[in-house]
Image (spheres, grey):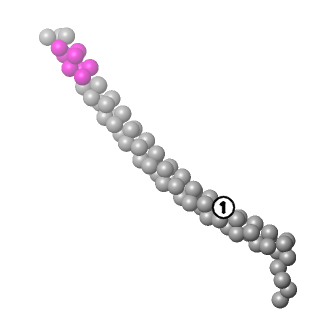
Amino acid sequence: MPPKTRTDSTASDIDATMKEILQQLKRINNRIEIIEEKVDSIESSLNYHTEQWKEVKEDMDQINKECWLC
């Protein structure tokens, strides 16, 4: 087998670097997916509590109207 040339070594280094970059991008993508799931959960919870608050406010408004009639 002939000895590695500088070009062979450089190509090998580039290949290893590209593989490492790909692994890092996969890890970043996984983290992004986890964050997106958490954001969706928070958004859902916020929507639920917003609806609950609207119901409470409607009840409070009704009570206030009734108190004015007293």
Residue 18 to residue 48: above or below:
below
Q: Residue at x 54, y 52 (%)?
A: 32
Q: Residue furthest left?
A: 70
Measured along the vertical axis of the image, is residue 14 above or below residue 33? below
Quadrant position of the N terminus in the picture: bottom right
Q: Is residue 42 magenta?
A: no
In the rendered picture of this protein, how many numbered marks are placed on residues?
1
Q: Residue at x 79, y 73 (%)?
A: 9
Q: Which x, y percent locates residue 59?
A: 24, 25
Q: Element type at marker 1?
A: helix
At horizontal 54% and vertical 58% (from top left) the residue drawn is 30
Q: Which residues are magenta?
A: 60-67
- Relative side of 29 to 15, left or right: left
- Which SS does the magenta portion mostly show? helix
Q: Is residue 63 left or right of residue 38?
A: left
The residue lying toward the viewer, choosing from 13 and 49, is: 13
Q: Nearer the viewer, residue 11 or 54?
A: 11
* Residue corresponding to mark 1: 21
Where is residue 15? Give x, y as percent.
Answer: 74, 69
Quarter of the image for residue 54 reads: top left
- Mark 1 crowd level (few <14, some 14–19, many ≥20, 10 Å Cα): few
Three-letter amino acid code at the position of disc 1: Ile
Indicate the quadrant containing the C terminus: top left, top right, bottom left or bottom right: top left
**Where 63 sits versus 54, above or below?**
above
Of residues 3 and 52, the one drawn nearer to the viewer in this rendering: 3
* Residue at 34% in and 37% down: 49
